[in-house]
Image: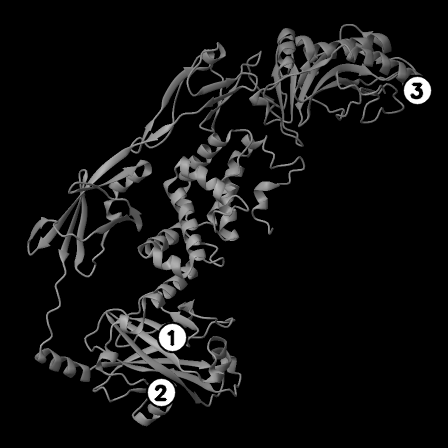
């Protein structure tokens, strides 16, 4: 076997020269280190040809074969086949425009003329000569065929490379005359060949051939792949067809650039703005811009007075939002406007999302918001001022207080679970606060114990049962919601959702309570079983209603032994929230509630949660920044991410890319949220960064309905790679073995 030379083709000969010994599956002649496999299949329907051809496009090279019928081993009777094969590496072609057909024909003639005998000229039947398989003869044949192969040097060729299927027996065939076969084998990169494992080419094929017939044009017409703003639109081979493109954005929200051309115009060198052609790769790139439209909407505020409305003339300011996201208000003299841009223009088709919040919310109340052409009409009214309380009202209030409803906080739990939440061993009083409109009702809780029989699953428990009880007066006519907090001075548990009265009873499941810290709290390992809050109607303030293991008792002393209730004056019992909390306490409490949302444990953090949180944060940003500047930086970082993706503007996304890169100090994001977002900016090296961001931005918008949380970006990225993996072939993120480097590393622990 001659030494491998990458400058010319490789050759292999397969057959059975000696009827008493097979040549083996690798062939008996190999030139230039031929690495492709050869075998001796039987192709039905091709027996009428003296010889025919086979084409296989592998991952790294193309194999061309000439299959000679009517061949016999030395002194044999039965006829077989002789096969000649050559290979050309991917990205190369035979120099000088020569076809692999020429090389195969010359190799066949050289071998048959020198080492075979013609037995039947009509059928072109040949028989191997004697002693072909001796070592010296094999060396001679190899050297001669290697000399032929060296005449067919290789040169680089840029163009499409369409690998055919591999590993199956899906075969197709093409019939053609000799000259067309030569042209076909000079360029075999047909898209029609891709689904098949092998394509046979012959002048004659019987009608009973069990293979798929392909009707193709010879020579192969160019088949261009067109990319519009980075998105593949599939192949196009009609070069005279006029093609039309625009940037593809919603015309209601954008002014789209448009362009028309024929591929023939581009091949002739015509220059068209936004369009580039790579004739060798057979690819066309169309890059068009979409300029966001802008719409200015006037705001008219109309005050309702009785059955009439009047123009707004109060000095109080207000904020405008859409689905909780703040919208900037512009002013021109006495007129008020806001501007919608791009996708925001769709707000106008669903005006119910608009909201108006008056800074002086104690004075004004929004009644109706609707859109009238290019004007947003906001109807509101002035809240009724509370009338002065007369002596008669005071007496009435006292009488109502005597008939008040009393709130009983009851928590029946086993001490072994209770200790995990609060330190029952120290018997420290707990504080319970009940929010009731403008009232903040507050009292202390003491622990009480009772013998316990059987516990969970019938197991006897010797520990005591812990009861939490508290009684506070509640207005007898109260019908709206309540809020509940329980704290031991270190940890606060509060109801995030409103609690409603049902038949005089309000129930709160403790597992649904949210925790916020106001000091250094102990680690909590398990949730408490339940917190049951009962409301029972009493006849008088002094008529305490007692609960003991779910049973009512008429003995007031039983309750007084177990409950220590703070004694408040009239003002203390019906005080306002300001009497029990300072500005700093409110800020700390609200920051604590923010931290329950922005948490590394909240893996499914949604953009809606971030927008809502930021809107609350922005109202008192200066106070929050004084209390916890580091966490405020985190809130603003998450808002930048949320705003960039909600708006989907390319400039914001470019800025955001730099911010979410690993190790960036400008942004403060938990890794569990930053990593999925970072995958959005994995730029393919087959496109420039602007094209890639534009491409991925459009992909995001197309799938926006499925992207609600930060973690959804992982799903988006996996779907993107699956759908567009064929276009990412030049991406350095994937090595030759198929393992992924940078794209999947975002999801590995660093």
C-alpha distance separating marks 3 and 1: 97 Å
The mark closer to the camera, 2 or 3, is 2
User: Label 2 to label 3, Cα distance in Å?
Assistant: 109 Å
Mark whose residue sits in front, 3 or 1: 1
Residue 345 circle label: none
Instruction: Label 3: state its secondary structure.
Output: helix
Q: What element carries label 2?
A: loop
In-front residue for pair 609/148: 609
Pick the residue in front: 220 or 716. 716
* Mark carried by residue 563: 2
Query: Does residue 403 show up?
Result: no
Q: Residue 135 carries which label?
A: 3
**Which quarter of the figure has residue 258?**
top left
Residue ranking furthest to the left: 307
Res 486 label: 1
- Quarter location, residue 374: top left
Residue at the spot x=28%, y=45% of the render?
Answer: 327
Q: Dot 2, how many residues are within 10 Å of its Cα: few (below 14), some (14-19), or many (20+)? A: many
Q: What residue occupies the far top of the structure in this picture?
A: 121
Q: Residues within 10 Å of mark 3 (few under 14, many from 20)?
A: few
In this rendered view, identify the residue nearer to me: 611 or 51: 611
């Amino acid at each position: 076997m001659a030494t491998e030379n990458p400058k010319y083709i490789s050759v292999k000969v397969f057959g059975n020269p000696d009827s008493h010994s097979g040549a083996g599956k690798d062939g008996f002649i190999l030139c230039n280190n031929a690495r492709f496999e050869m075998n001796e299949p039987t192709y039905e329907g091709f027996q009428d040809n003296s010889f025919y051809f086979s084409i296989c496009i592998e991952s790294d090279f193309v194999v061309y074969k000439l299959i000679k019928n009517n061949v016999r081993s030395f002194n044999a009777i039965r006829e077989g086949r002789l096969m000649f094969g050559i290979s050309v590496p991917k990205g190369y072609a035979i120099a000088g425009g020569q076809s692999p057909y020429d090389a195969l024909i010359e190799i066949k003639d050289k071998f048959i003329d020198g080492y075979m005998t013609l037995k039947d000229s009509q059928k072109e039947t040949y028989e191997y000569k004697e002693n072909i398989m001796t070592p010296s003869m094999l060396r001679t044949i190899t050297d001669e065929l290697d000399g032929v192969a060296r005449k067919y040097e290789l040169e680089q060729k840029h163009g499409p490379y369409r690998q055919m299927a591999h590993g199956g027996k899906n075969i197709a065939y093409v019939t053609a005359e000799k000259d067309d076969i030569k042209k076909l084998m000079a360029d075999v990169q047909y898209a029609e060949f891709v689904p098949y494992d092998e394509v046979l080419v012959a002048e004659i094929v019987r009608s009973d051939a069990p293979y798929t017939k392909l009707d193709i044009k010879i020579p192969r017409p160019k088949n261009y792949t067109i990319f519009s703003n980075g998105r593949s639109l599939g192949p196009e081979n009609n070069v005279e067809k006029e093609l039309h493109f625009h940037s593809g954005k919603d015309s209601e929200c954008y002014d789209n650039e448009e362009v028309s051309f024929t591929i023939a115009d581009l091949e002739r060198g015509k220059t068209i703005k936004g369009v580039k052609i790579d004739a060798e790769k057979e690819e066309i790139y169309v890059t068009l811009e979409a300029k966001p439209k802008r719409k200015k909407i006037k705001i008219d505020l109309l005050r309702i007075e009785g059955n009439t409305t009047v123009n707004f003339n109060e000095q109080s300011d207000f904020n405008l939002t859409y689905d909780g996201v703040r919208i900037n208000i512009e002013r021109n003299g006495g007129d008020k406007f806001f501007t919608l841009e791009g996708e925001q223009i769709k707000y106008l088709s669903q005006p119910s999302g608009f909201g108006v919040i008056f800074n002086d919310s104690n004075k004004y109340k929004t009644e109706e918001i609707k859109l009238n052409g290019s004007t947003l009409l906001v109807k509101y009214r002035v809240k009724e001022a509370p009338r002065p309380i007369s002596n008669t009202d005071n007496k009435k209030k006292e009488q109502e207080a005597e008939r008040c409803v009393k709130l009983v906080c009851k928590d029946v739990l086993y001490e072994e679970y209770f200790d995990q939440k609060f330190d029952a061993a120290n018997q420290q009083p707990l504080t319970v606060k009940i929010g009731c409109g403008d009232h903040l009702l507050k009292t202390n809780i003491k622990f009480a114990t009772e013998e316990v029989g059987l516990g969970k699953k019938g197991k006897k428990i010797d520990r005591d049962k812990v009861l939490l009880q508290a009684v506070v007066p509640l207005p007898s006519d109260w019908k709206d919601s309540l809020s509940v907090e329980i704290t031991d001075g270190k940890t606060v548990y509060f109801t995030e959702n409103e609690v409603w009265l049902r038949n005089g009873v309000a129930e709160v499941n403790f597992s649904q309570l949210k925790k916020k810290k106001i000091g250094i709290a102990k680690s909590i390992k398990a949730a408490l079983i339940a917190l049951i809050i009962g409301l029972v109607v009493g006849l008088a303030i002094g008529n305490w209603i007692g609960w003991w293991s779910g049973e009512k008792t008429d003995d007031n002393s039983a309750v007084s032994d177990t409950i220590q209730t703070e004694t408040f004056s009239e003002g203390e019992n019906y005080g306002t929230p300001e009497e029990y909390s300072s500005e700093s306490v409110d800020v700390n409490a609200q920051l604590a509630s923010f931290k329950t949302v922005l948490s590394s444990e909240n893996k499914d953090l949604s953009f809606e949660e971030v927008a809502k949180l930021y809107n609350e944060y922005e109202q008192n940003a200066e106070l929050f920044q004084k209390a916890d500047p580091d966490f405020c930086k985190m809130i603003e970082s998450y808002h930048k991410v949320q705003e960039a993706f909600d708006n989907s503007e390319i400039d914001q996304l470019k800025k955001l890319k730099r911010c979410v890169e690993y190790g960036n100090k400008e942004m403060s994001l938990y890794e569990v949220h930053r990593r999925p977002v970072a995958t959005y900016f994995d730029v393919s090296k087959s496109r420039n960064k602007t094209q890639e961001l534009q491409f991925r931005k459009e992909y995001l918008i197309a799938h926006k309905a499925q992207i609600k949380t930060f973690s959804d970006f992982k799903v988006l990225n996996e779907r993107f790679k699956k759908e567009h993996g064929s276009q990412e072939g030049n991406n350095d993120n994937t090595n030759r073995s198929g393992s992924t480097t940078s794209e999947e590393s975002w999801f590995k622990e660093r």
